[in-house]
Amino acid sequence: MAAAFNSFTSLSRLVKPSSSSKTPKLFNLLSFSPKSPCQTKFSHFALKPPPVSVLFSPNPSKSLKPQFSSTPVRSLFTGIVEEMGEIKHLGFDKDESFTMKMKAQTMLEDIHLGDSISVNGTCLTVTDFDTTLSEFTVGLSPETLRKTSLSELEQGSSVNLERALRPTTRMGGHFVQGHVDGTGVIVGRETEGDSLWVKVKTGKELLKYIVPKGFIAVDGTSLTVVDVFDDEECFNFMLVAYTQQKVVIPLKQVGQKVNLEVDILGKYVERLLSSGFLDAIKSS
């Protein structure tokens, strides 16, 4: 809990940005000071933080490890990005309601309230839309902001967008749930011809599910892992020229975060092995 309160002062820079800061980033969005009033406007909405009890887990003393969601799969994606959208607004539009408004084209073609859209690999629900302005809005919970890199976005940022899979849709990538398992940090970028090598560092808790030539979703983009470097807790992948023009990963620099969703098959295998499934098979 001490670590959380040490970062309370960070919010003051978000809520009361300096005159030289045009669009404050949201690195410490969830670090609110319970004694500091939040009355500064963010975009055209009044910022008012939700109570600390809403933002922190009941047991903040526990270490934050990736907790794979047991939420039933209501939407499925392929990891093939349909378009890149642009953030128009990011912040509180009313008490305890943090929203993100995006400008897009393809997403608005057959949009409905309650639709699931993957935003940088995070499955979010459409809460409002305007086809005339080509904009739609999604809500963000404190838990989503804690577990993903969405808190680093700012007005004008580009994001990967994909609508939920339909039974008639061609399957071009792999099964992606939009349930972010954790984040990684870009630690290397290197060009080779017109291709781009990207190296990402993540924790051991996620790295154990990442295998060479296996699937992984990075910011919602279905990619093939090239190599895994266990001693460095890193893995890498390559983006061809076409992909570089269609996704946001090449726009990010070394040190920036990316959302990661590992292949669900690895988690199922681990679960079966830990439950004594093989022993049951042998004894039958």
Image (tube, rainbow, N blue to C red):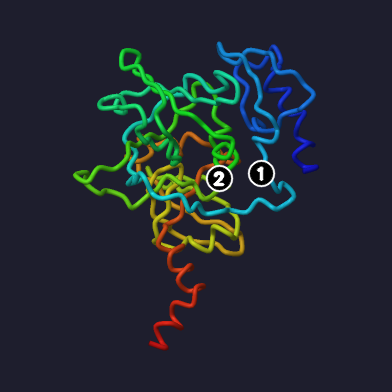
- The amino acid type of the residue labelled 2 equals Ile
Question: Which sits in the foreground, 243 or 195?
Answer: 243
Q: Residue at x 42, y 88 (%)?
A: 283
Q: Which quarter of the rendering shows the N terminus?
A: top right
Left or right: residue 78 versus residue 151 is left
Q: Residues within 10 Å of mark 2 (few under 14, many from 20)?
A: many
To which residue does mark 1 refer? 57
Q: How many numbered badges does the structure rendering display?
A: 2
In the displayed image of the protein, which residue is found farthest to the bottom? 283
Helix, strand or loop at mark 1: loop
Relative horizontal placement of residue 161, taking residue 106 as reference (left or right): right
Residue 239: x percent and y percent?
39, 46
Residue depicted at 37% across the width and 42% down the height: 194
Side of 254 where 8 appears, left or right: right
Quarter the C terminus occupies: bottom left
- Disc ID at residue 241: none
Front residue (pair 167, 22):
167
Q: Mark 2 falls on what kind of element?
A: strand
- Could you say where residue 256 lies in the image, as x and y percent from the top left? 58, 39
Q: Earlier in the sequence, mark 1 or mark 2?
A: 1
- The image quarter containing residue 135 is top left
Q: CA distance from mark 1 to mark 2?
A: 28 Å
Task: Find disc 2 in the rendering and name its residue.
Answer: 186
The reply, left or right, for residue 43 in relation to residue 119 is right
Q: Position of residue 215 (x, y in %)?
A: 39, 56
Splitting the image into 4 quarters, where does residue 122 fall? top left
Q: Amino acid at mark 1?
A: Ser
Between residue 242 and residue 62, name the one nearer to us: 62
Q: Position of residue 263 (x, y in %)?
A: 42, 57
Q: Nearer the viewer, mark 1 or mark 2?
A: 1
